[in-house]
Amino acid sequence: QVQLAESGGGLVQPGGSLTLSCAGSGSRFSFDQMGWYRQAPGKQRELVASITNSGNTLYGDSVQGRFTISRGSAKNTMYLQMNSLKPEDTALYLCHAYRIVNVEGARVDFWGEGTLVTVSS
């Protein structure tokens, strides 16, 4: 059974930094893409950043230039370096990954349970 486990969340002051980690287990294969989403109370889930297994990245407009996503050297690991944090970055951050399972592009998606980031003074 594939599982994604996030870590690294916590309370940080505005302007501070945090690094989130996501480790996937239970898969013989490398994920084709991994990413971070976040969900704040009363808001829709939004993409924070994603990275393909070839290293192509995509960032949400609100975090561009402040956050950096990377894949780890271990299979199916991923990090999110968050700098210049703002109160509006407060949310539950969820690790997401998918694997393409056939030539038509069908995929299987996986989600972690999330790690809470709170930016407050």
Image (cartoon, rainbow, N blue to C red):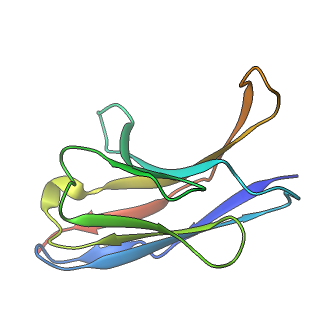
Relative side of 120 to 44, left or right: left
> Is 118 drawn above or below residue 111 in the view shown?
below
Comparing 5 with 80, the one in front is: 80
Count of numbered circles on the image = 0
Which residue is at a point 69% across and 77% down the rendered structure image? 74
Relative side of 57 to 111, left or right: left
Task: Please provide percent x and percent y for residue 98.
Answer: 67, 42
> Is 63 drawn above or below residue 86 in the view shown?
above
Which residue is at a point 82% across and 28% down the rendered structure image? 102
Task: Please provide percent x and percent y for residue 28.
Answer: 88, 59
> Is 49 drawn above or below residue 79 in the view shown?
above
Task: Please provide percent x and percent y for residue 47.
Answer: 38, 41
Which residue is at a point 46% across and 76% down the rendered structure image? 8
> Is 102 drawn above or below residue 91 in the view shown?
above
Task: Please provide percent x and percent y for residue 54.
Answer: 57, 56
Most extreme residue toward the top, as rendered?
104
Q: Quadrant of the C terminus?
A: bottom left
Relative side of 85 to 42, left or right: left
